[in-house]
Amino acid sequence: MTQAKIGIIGGSGLYQMDALKDRQEIQIDTPFGRPSDAYIVGTLEGTPVAFLARHGRNHHLIPSELPFRANIYGMKQLGVEYIISASAVGSLKGEIKPLDMVIPDQFIDRTSQRISTFFGSGIVAHIGFGHPVCNKLAAILGDAVQSLALPDINLHRGGTYVCMEGPAFSTIAESNLYRSWDASIIGMTNLPEAKLAREAEIAYATLGLVTDYDCWHRDHDHVTVEMIIDNLHRNAINAQKVILETVKQLSQNPPISEAHYALKYAILTPLDKISPEIKENLAILLEKYLK
Ligand SMILES: CSC[C@H]1O[C@H](OP(=O)(O)O)[C@H](O)[C@@H]1O
Ligand SMILES: Nc1ncnc2[nH]cnc12
């Protein structure tokens, strides 16, 4: 199978990378089912990357339906070691305005219907998740945004992303609750992805692309898809520039991330007590520990 060390997950509005050359569509089947769509593997200015549209290219999957495990496992099968995730988010702070970019360093889980682990059914592992984002990848992403100096767009390094279930947006009471927790942005997808990426020993960082002020701001209408569609398009153009620059910097100097050895001390079940079936299903995650 064609391999790529860098994976890109495109969210709402970002369904492809225009600059991707030598494209190959790769359909992958995983022990956790089919990913959201085919991976588009190709090169960005000479660097191999794998792109996946999180909701499918035609945006046909709601956040609760996303096959998160298959998406991350598929990336692992392609040899991905770094995932750059692009996501539309609502702002929970006055100083974070639509079209700004936020690189969160924390998450709060408000989901209820997601499977966020590869483990269970006979194998127990507990990864550390105090720092859910790879700080080295996040720094490269932030430097890429800064080096582009996009007019009128502020970069916010750090901040807490609230991951809600959706698909309906929040109530005012919920939005104000998250504000009282000092959270910065809200979305519906990134937490399960970040957790599974960590279990798969893939460094993960998010480029949050702000589309709205959710529903808490007195001077702004409550978020609707109709209201944010224009911002989604503008963000998708900016996101592609940032991703291109990030890939350039990352390929020149790929850092070793703590994510790359997240499973080293995480597995509690003795390896010789793990069934052959589990070993086969999780082969790609466990192979370096089973040698
Ligand atoms: C654009 S409306 C809400 C939708 O957008 C975000 O998607 P993604 O994170 O994939 O960019 C949010 O999480 C919701 O799924
Ligand atoms: N206000 C919001 N709430 C949840 N997800 C979002 N994605 C973009 N804006 C959002």
Image: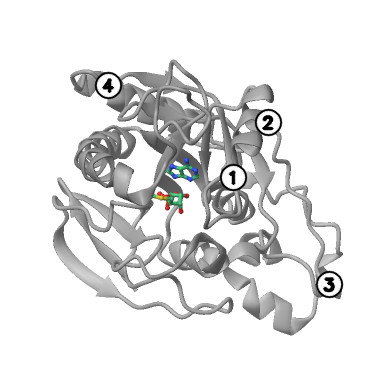
Relative to 284, say whether 147 is above or below.
above
Residue identified by numbered label 4: 153
Quadrant of the image containing the C terminus: bottom right
Count residues near mark 1 (Cα–Cα under 10 Å), then give few for <14, some for 14-19, many for 20+: many
SS for dot 3: helix
Of the two numbered discs 4 and 1 on the same chain, state the one appearing first in sequence: 4
Residue identified by numbered label 1: 163
The residue depicted at 54 percent of the width and 25 percent of the height is 159
- Going by the numbered disc 3, the residue's amino acid type is Asp
Of the two numbered discs 4 and 3 on the same chain, state the one appearing first in sequence: 4
Tag nearer the camera, 4 or 3: 4
Quadrant of the image containing the N terminus: bottom left
**Label ID, residue 272:** 3
The residue depicted at 55 percent of the width and 53 percent of the height is 193
Tag nearer the camera, 1 or 2: 2
Q: x and y percent of residue 230 in the render?
A: 22, 43
**Label ID, residue 177:** 2
